[in-house]
Image (cartoon, rainbow, N blue to C red):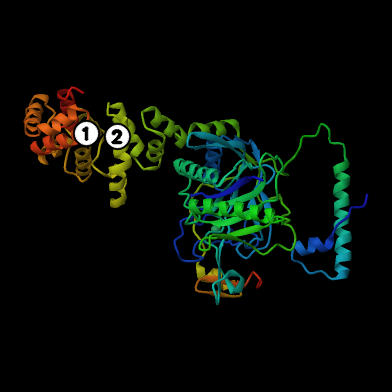
Amino acid sequence: MTWEAVIGLETHVELQTASKMFCGCPVDFGDEPNTAVCPVCLGLPGALPVPNEQAIEGILSIGAALNCTLTESSLFYRKNYFYPDLPKNYQISQYTFPLCLGGHLDVDIDGTVTRIGITRVHMEEDTGKSTHVGRSGRIQSADHTLLDFNRSGVPLVEIVTEPDIRSADEARVYGTELQRIVRALGVSDARLEEGSMRFDSNVSIRPSGSTELGTRTEVKNVNSLRSLHRAITFEIERQIEVVESGGTVDQETRHWNEDLGTTTSMRNKEESEDYRYFQEPDLLPLHIDVSWQERVRAALPVLPAELRNRYRQAGADARTAEILVDGEGLGPLFEEAAVLGADPRAVGIWLTGEVISFTRTAETAVTTTPLTAAHLVELSEMTADGRLSATAAKEVLTAVLEGEGAPGEIADARDLIQVSDVGAIETEVDAVIAEHLDAFEKLRAGDPKTLGFLTGQVMRATGGKADPRVVQELLRRKAGG
Amino acid sequence: MPVEIDIAKVAKLARIALTDEEQETYGRQLADILEHAARVQALATDGVKPTSHPLTMVNAFRPDEVTGSLPRDEVLAMAPDAVDGYFRVPKILDEQ
Ligand SMILES: [Zn+2]
């Protein structure tokens, strides 16, 4: 039997506002524990929450970017549960009336576009951080739990998909694209390794072709997009193995262990979750009127998918377009060079090759280097008319990045201009033919290997400055080919 | 119309230990409250505008400004146990 995976993702994104969701403590709090806490985020009796307007703007822009309906009337709820990092014993969240409903995100894998439904996007607050200390460092054998409430009350947006994802690949591409969008909106740095973006995956399997849903497990604790892919791949295979060996999948939460590359069962809760949601009496309803909704949509930046389309229309291939979107400042440079008449294919190769490796090594963005679109145009022209070989062009580009000047100057200074003047090259070609008549006869007889040999001889005779394309063209013509 | 209520479960979810007598008393009181709510729910409300909140105001926001936090010493002094700037609580998961 073949199996199909059914996956839904819940993504938490911390918003990088200045202050927390319901109090004036800072969100950027540094390393010292419990230094950004107040009666509200410590859950002290009598403290009253007041929502941060900027956080509401942030979630609305995420919802709009994900094609959601921004709901006119929305409510905060209390989600009740007991855990030491939740000082109020409830988390302020949303339930029946979230701020954003029913959107979608298209994921493109090698040209195949799959639409992933977005069920809802809602606003809540982050919890504190617990550290379990004990002899072995393992959670289960911890002696004590240490609590830091700096993170408590940081604005948190939860984005829930429909179970529309069918593979670990799709999950990773969805996660990558969501991260790009959130960053493009400027609402979060969305760093998985630092926890400002977190993915929980609901994974189940079913026989291919079936429309029923199998029992799902929830996989937590992935801290990179790579581990998201690994964890889902593992969990799918584990479930198939369980079912094929006659067992059944338990509905449970499973913990991804990065070092072991496995998921393990968290202790089963004694009874099913009962969060006893009820409307937060300390907060007023939210009313996002149509003009607010329209303002949010109008203020959206150009999103990654549209940028990729634009770059492709300007002549970039799919992979190049993706790299241009992800690399800071690369896309605008590409577009400007293409508009000014540079060869988009060559510019794409340079930007995704030499330029990226230079900026990576220098740990900077291309916008801080001297490279301009005009330089790329000049380089493109010099390559197209044969003055620069592909190899020389790359050398010149690196020199431009290092601040040595414009391509023309650099090529002159480094003596890299190749000779494309047919008359001059022909003289050298004739001399080489006279010297290697045997090889030339073989070329005439149709032996292609001698073309390389003779070209090499001409290149050597010209000190590598002849345009090899012109040399080969001349040799072929003279051999009557 | 009597309303069934699992008072033991409610108490457990709220982490409140109740004696049998208290379960009996509070169970009866809660059932009375729910019965009252059921009577209200049974009223004909056609033509009455739905209410989602007792107040008619909406959107009480604050600007995104940092207004300060409490000194850590004061905060930790309120706790039964603290170490190295952290609150310290008993372990939360049992040995497996
Ligand atoms: Zn606070």
User: In terms of depth relative to the viewer, which is nearer, A143 or A260?
Assistant: A260
Give the image quarter of residue A292. Answer: top right
The residue at label 1 has a CB less than 8 Å from ligand 1? no
Q: Position of residue A315 (x, y in %)?
A: 36, 29
Q: Quadrant of residue A475?
A: top left
Q: Residue furthest bottom?
A: A135
* Label 2 chain ID: A
Residue nearest the viewer, comparing A472 with A141: A472
Secondary element under disc 1, as helix, strand or loop, is helix
**What's the mark number on residue A379?**
1
Residue at left offset 45%, top offset 44%: A183
Within-10-Å neighbours for mark 1: few <14, some 14–19, many 20+: many
In the image, taking residue A400 as reference, residue A208 lies left or right, namely right
| Left or right placement of residue B6 versus residue A343 in this view | right
Q: Which mark is residue A59?
A: none
Left or right for A83, reference A382: right
Task: Give above or below for A363 relative to B92.
Answer: above
- Seen at 34% across and 31% down, the residue is A335
Q: Quadrant of ligand 1?
A: bottom right
**Is the Cβ of the residue at disc 2 closer than 8 Å to that at disc 1?**
no
Which one is in front, A126 or A393?
A393
* Residue B48 visible in the snapshot: yes
Q: Decide which of tag 2 and tag 1 comes sooner along the chain.
A: 2
Expressed as whole percent of the image width and height from the top left, the position of residue A201 reads 60, 50
Determine which residue is flagged by label 2.
A347
Counting every numbered tag in the picture gives 2
Residue A465 visible: no
Please determine whether, in this image, residue A362 is positioned above or below residue A85: above
Residue type at mark 1 is Leu
